[in-house]
Image: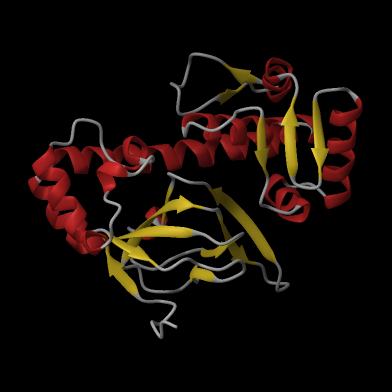
């Protein structure tokens, strides 16, 4: 049995699977990167051992050293409240990055906890920054990703301030569906690793309200729910209920109509 520490970071170059062979390649890495540039990037990317369900990738207040890409599984980010509870700030799915919000102050403002056994790639930021100075495509990608985070935060603010409980849950499910679809998975059938309580926390709804909305959607034939397994029967109707505006934000995002 291996005695390797759970937090050991193993360079990706020593693993059999390289970035170019990963199914998330076009999502995590910039389009147009050359073979030589990719090899240089691979040399700094490290693969962590799987993070077990309930374990933390990092805690709020930890020094910022790296950004992370989710390879499989899912992670929630949250901040503790004065009452000792959690305020969920986001959910991160395969192919998505986290830790970018710590770049400015060099301290993680949020904690990141695995919702299921999750594997991640770690990208030491100082090495990435040096490399991006020599490879403009990496710098552009970082700016794009940071812009995406700002946009999603603004969208979430609108969601909480302008939408009904039904519209909030519909928008959330449509977002999850779209994000899975971009990664080559089914847009209409997926597993929600987050609890109803976490979903309600993120959407500013009571857990009872979230459960009631799921029941209503199921009774209306919009979707089927069996524990955390979701089957969406009418994506078009879900999109309309979410208030999504097609064709205005590019394929990576959906816009929400103000109501």
Q: Position of residue 200 (x, y in %)?
A: 75, 49
Residue located at (72% from left, 22% from top): 238
236, above or below 129, in the image: above
Residue at figure coordinates x 68%, y 34% from the top left: 173
Q: State how many labels appear.
A: 0
Q: Nearer the viewer, residue 162 or 53?
A: 53
Quarter that holds the N terminus: bottom left
Determine whether, in the image, residue 48 is placed left or right of residue 210: left
* x and y percentages locating residue 158 in the rendered image: 62, 34
Can the viewer see residue 142 in this picture? Answer: no
Vertical relation: 43 (above or below) 25: below
Specify the quadrant that holds the C terminus: top right
The answer to whether residue 177 is above or below residue 118 is: above
Q: Residue 64 in the image: x percent, y percent?
A: 35, 68
Q: Is residue 207 left or right of residue 155?
A: right
Q: Nearer the viewer, residue 171 or 57?
A: 57
Colouring mode (rainbow / by chain / secondary structure / one colour): secondary structure
Q: Which residue occupies the extreme front position in the image?
A: 1
Task: Kindly indicate the quadrant of the structure image that contains residue 85.
Answer: bottom right
**Residue 75 in sight from this viewpoint:** yes
Which one is in front, 155 or 31? 31
User: With 7 as the anchor, is 14 left or right in this view?
Assistant: left
Q: Which residue sits at x=82%, y=42%?
A: 226
Q: Quadrant of residue 87?
A: bottom right
Instruction: Give me the residue at 86% from left, 44% from top.
Output: 211
Location of residue 96 in the rendering, given as x and y in whole percent from the top left corner? 44, 45
């Amino acid at each position: 049995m291996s005695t390797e520490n759970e937090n050991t970071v193993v360079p990706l170059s020593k693993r059999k699977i390289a970035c170019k062979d990963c199914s998330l390649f076009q999502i995590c890495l910039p389009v147009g990167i050359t073979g030589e540039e990719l090899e240089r990037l691979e040399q700094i990317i490290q693969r962590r051992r799987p993070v077990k369900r309930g374990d933390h990738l990092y805690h709020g207040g930890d020094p910022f050293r790296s950004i992370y890409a989710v390879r499989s599984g899912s992670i929630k980010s949250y901040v503790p409240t004065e009452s000792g509870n959690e305020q969920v700030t986001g959910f991160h799915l395969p192919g998505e990055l986290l830790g970018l919000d710590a770049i400015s102050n060099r301290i993680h403002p949020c904690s990141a906890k695995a919702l299921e056994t999750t594997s991640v790639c770690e990208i030491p930021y100082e090495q990435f920054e040096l490399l991006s100075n020599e490879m403009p495509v990496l710098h552009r990608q970082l700016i794009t990703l940071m812009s995406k985070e700002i946009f999603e935060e603004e969208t979430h603010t609108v969601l909480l301030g302008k939408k009904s409980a039904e519209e909030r849950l519909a928008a959330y499910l449509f977002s999850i569906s779209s994000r899975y679809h971009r990664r080559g998975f089914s847009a209409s059938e997926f597993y929600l690793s987050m609890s109803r309580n976490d979903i309600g926390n993120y959407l500013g709804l009571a857990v009872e309200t979230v459960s009631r909305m799921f029941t209503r959607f199921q009774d209306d034939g919009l979707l089927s729910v069996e524990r955390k397994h979701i089957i969406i029967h009418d994506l078009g109707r879900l999109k309309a209920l979410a208030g999504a505006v097609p064709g205005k934000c590019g394929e990576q995002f959906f816009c929400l109509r103000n109501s």
